[in-house]
Image: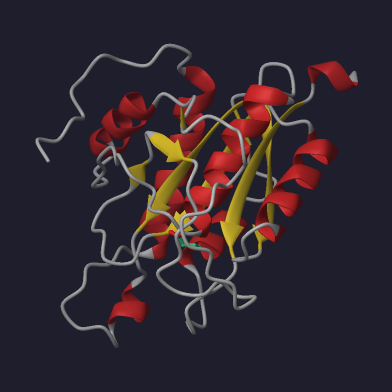
Amino acid sequence: MSPSSVVNVLLTGFEPFDKDAINPSWEAVRALDGWRCEGATVHVRRVSCVFGAALRELDSAIDELQPQLVLGIGQAGGRSEITPERVAINVDDGRICDNAGCQPIDMPVVAGAPVAYFATLPIKAIVRDLRAGGIPASVSNSAGTFVCNHLFFGLMHRIATRPVPGMRGGFIHIPYLPEQVARLPGLPSMALETVIAALRIAVRTSLSVREDVRETGGLLH
Ligand code: PCA
């Protein structure tokens, strides 16, 4: 097979943060290493929950793999659904410190870059296909202002300014795992097998749907 016919997908998951022992994003992502889908091969990387370092790690993985599709995955503790993110904003505003002890406040992710980028994933089709597969899902209109949004913005800025030809990308937040909320009573969770199944659907739909479907995913507030 010639290198030009190789189609790579990059999935990133985060290391644990905020004193947690696990991060479900990495637990789910790592289960998909080497998975082949729609003629593409999935590669996985664990990234640091550190402003700056996470972007450098993402950049070198993109340089190495030249992927056609990049999906960042992160934990959104407290959410009950799989949530493809619509928009990355050019703001770092840490409510907590990152894993290097840094807590930027109202700093740009990239100085001089646009205020925001939209994901270039078919987010509506992903939500449709997840729901059809029996998995709770909704579009999210905010990836927050911590390291997940930082990675998402950096990814979209790279696509806008130094693209791998044809590369598309975006970010998906996932809920806590049941074992995490066993010590956080009352919060929602999703089983690891369900999250893994969701990521398979998200990859397949991202590879096969080029034009997003026109379905409402909006919120009143
Ligand atoms: N979630 C955090 C950072 C790492 C993660 O998995 C976030 O939503 O920013």
Q: Quadrant of residue 157?
A: top right
Figure check: 34 above or below 5: below
Residue ID at (75%, 43%):
59
**Residue 161 appearing in the image:** yes
Residue located farthest toward the bottom when viewing the structure as drawn: 183
Q: In the image, 220: left or right of 216?
A: left
Figure check: 163 above or below 131: above
Residue ID at (59%, 32%):
113
Residue 21 pos. (x, y %): 52, 83
Of the pair 29 and 144, the residue shown nearer to us: 144
Residue 3 pos. (x, y %): 88, 22
Residue 116 pos. (x, y %): 46, 32
Q: In the image, 26: left or right of 144?
A: right
Residue ID at (31%, 38%):
130
Instruction: Classify the position of the C terminus by image quarter.
Output: top left
Residue ID at (61%, 58%):
30
Give the color scheme: rainbow, by chain, secondary structure or one colour: secondary structure
Of the pair 152 and 199, the residue shown nearer to us: 152
